[in-house]
Image (cartoon, rainbow, N blue to C red):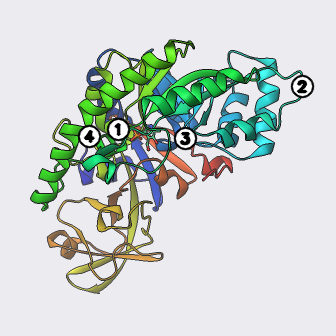
């Protein structure tokens, strides 16, 4: 991992603010994730990268990075137009224009068109409503709730996504899909966000860490068993070639399940701060952004221009960006990271002068790319490319 002085040398000619990806760190993360995924193919989560050039480099890096888990249907169709195949849209859509376009793609390429996510009959109806009589089948994936239920279902832990939780519910939706000749069941996905996306060693919160570990120790075997039972029940009457699960934080657990044919990873390439606190693995920070120090409100405070790039989610302090380099900087508890300025405190702040730059990390992965038109790609001690983000290509999907 480079030091502040090394990054300053690398980026000497680039004006702040700017964002970058350190490819050496990213490839170290890629290798580490492949090693954790128990020889399974890894579908790449596009929402956590939001830069086509980076996605393409990852897919070319190793054959096991295979296909994309995309986040909206318009994004997916755009990627398909660029020649991407093996696309699975992770979240359901009600966008009838995009569904209409998908229907056309499915006619042109029945086995290669994107697969869309469904978890209820309304989703099936929405897809069918755009299909003409002679349309080719649209491939769908059933999203199974991988949440952990305790106390007879009175406590439900996990993202509030699909209503399909039990084997019976999953099999019933699969049978409904089988009854509809214009739909083809191509995949089942069950993403255990309460394991994959929740660090089990939150700093300064020992009790919370212990309760997260308690929950994850019970949730992992429960979802492994239920996922296998769901896949077995559906395979009694349908093929379902793809069974997807997992995320950056659960690769070794989900990857080791026989019923799972592939895992997903995205955030682990950039390794944002929300992935700093897991006991099962550690990653190397690979993406960051630089801000210029433009003010010294007092000798011990250095104030940067901009920086208020908060991550989506629960709205707690962990969603703020973190000062990274030089080490020894802290956000101000009152101001945090602001729209136009971010005051920096801590021992290193006194050393910073107007015109210096500081390096920050985002809490989440792909959202960084919604703030910058391009990413500078670094290899060794030099910039090897500057590539547009989705935003830089004029594409804002969510
Ligand atoms: C359906 C699904 N699968 C997998 C992931 C894992 O992505 P990442 O590796 O970026 O955490 C996510 C992230 O939210 C997701 O929604």
Q: Earlier in the sequence, mark 3 or mark 2?
A: 3
Residue sitting at x 49%, y 38%: 164
Q: Which mark is residue 268?
A: 1
Dot 3: element: loop
Residue sitting at x 35%, y 28%: 226
Closest to the camera, between mark 3 and mark 2, is 2
| The CB of the residue at mark 1 lies under 8 Å from ligand 1 | yes
Q: CA distance from mark 2 to mark 4?
A: 52 Å
Q: CA distance from mark 2 to mark 1?
A: 43 Å
Instruction: Report the residue marked by disc 3.
Output: 51
Instruction: Provide residue 324's location: percent of width, then percent of height.
Output: 26, 57
Residue sitting at x 66%, y 44%: 93
Q: CA distance from mark 3 to mark 2?
A: 37 Å
Badge 1: residue crowd in 10 Å (few <14, some 14–19, many ≥20): many
Dot 4: element: loop
Instruction: Report the residue marked by disc 2.
Output: 133
Do the numbered discs 4 and 1 sit on residues whose CB atoms are within 8 Å? no
Instruction: Provide residue 277's location: percent of width, then percent of height.
Output: 21, 48
Instruction: Report the residue marked by disc 4.
Output: 284
Tell me: 162 left or right of 320.
right
The answer to which quarter of the image holds residue 105 is: top right
Tell which of 378 and 394 is nearer to you. 394
Tell which of 193 and 178 is nearer to you. 178
Dot 2: element: loop
């Amino acid at each position: 991992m480079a030091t502040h002085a090394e990054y300053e040398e690398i980026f000497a000619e680039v004006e702040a603010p700017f964002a970058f990806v350190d490819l050496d760190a990213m490839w170290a993360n890629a290798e580490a994730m492949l090693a954790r995924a128990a020889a399974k193919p890894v579908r790449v989560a596009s929402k956590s990268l939001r830069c086509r050039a980076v996605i393409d480099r990852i897919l070319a890096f190793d054959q096991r990075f295979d296909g994309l888990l995309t986040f909206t249907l318009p994004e997916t169709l755009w990627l398909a137009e660029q020649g991407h195949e093996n696309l699975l849209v992770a979240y359901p859509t009600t966008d009838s224009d995009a569904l209409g376009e998908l229907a056309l793609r499915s006619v042109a390429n029945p086995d290669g068109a994107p697969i869309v996510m469904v978890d209820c009959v309304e989703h099936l109806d929405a897809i069918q409503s755009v299909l003409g009589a002679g349309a080719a089948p649209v491939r769908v994936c059933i999203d199974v709730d991988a949440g952990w239920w305790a106390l007879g279902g009175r406590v439900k832990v996990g993202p509030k996504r699909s209503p399909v939780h039990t084997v019976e519910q999953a099999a019933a939706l699969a049978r409904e899909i089988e009854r509809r000749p214009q739909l083809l069941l191509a995949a089942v996905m069950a993403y255990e966000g309460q394991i994959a996306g929740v660090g089990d060693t939150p700093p300064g919160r020992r009790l919370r860490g212990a309760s997260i570990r308690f929950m994850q120790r019970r949730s992992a075997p429960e979802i492994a068993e239920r996922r296998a039972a769901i896949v077995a029940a559906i395979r009694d009457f349908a093929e379902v070639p793809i069974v997807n699960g997992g995320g950056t934080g659960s690769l070794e657990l989900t990857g080791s399940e026989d019923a799972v044919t592939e895992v997903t990873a995205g955030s682990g390439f950039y390794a944002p701060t929300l992935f700093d606190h897991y006991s099962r693995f550690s990653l190397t920070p690979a993406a960051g952004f630089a801000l210029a120090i433009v003010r010294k409100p007092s000798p011990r405070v250095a104030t940067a221009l901009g920086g208020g790039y908060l991550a989506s989610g629960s709205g707690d302090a962990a969603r703020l960006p973190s000062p990274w380099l030089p080490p020894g900087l802290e956000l101000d508890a009152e101001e945090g990271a602001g729209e136009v300025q971010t005051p920096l405190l801590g021992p290193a702040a006194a050393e910073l002068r107007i015109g210096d730059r500081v390096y920050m990390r985002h809490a989440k992965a792909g959202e960084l790319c919604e703030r910058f038109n391009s990413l500078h790609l670094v290899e060794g001690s030099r910039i090897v490319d500057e590539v547009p983000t989705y935003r830089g290509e004029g594409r804002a999907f969510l």
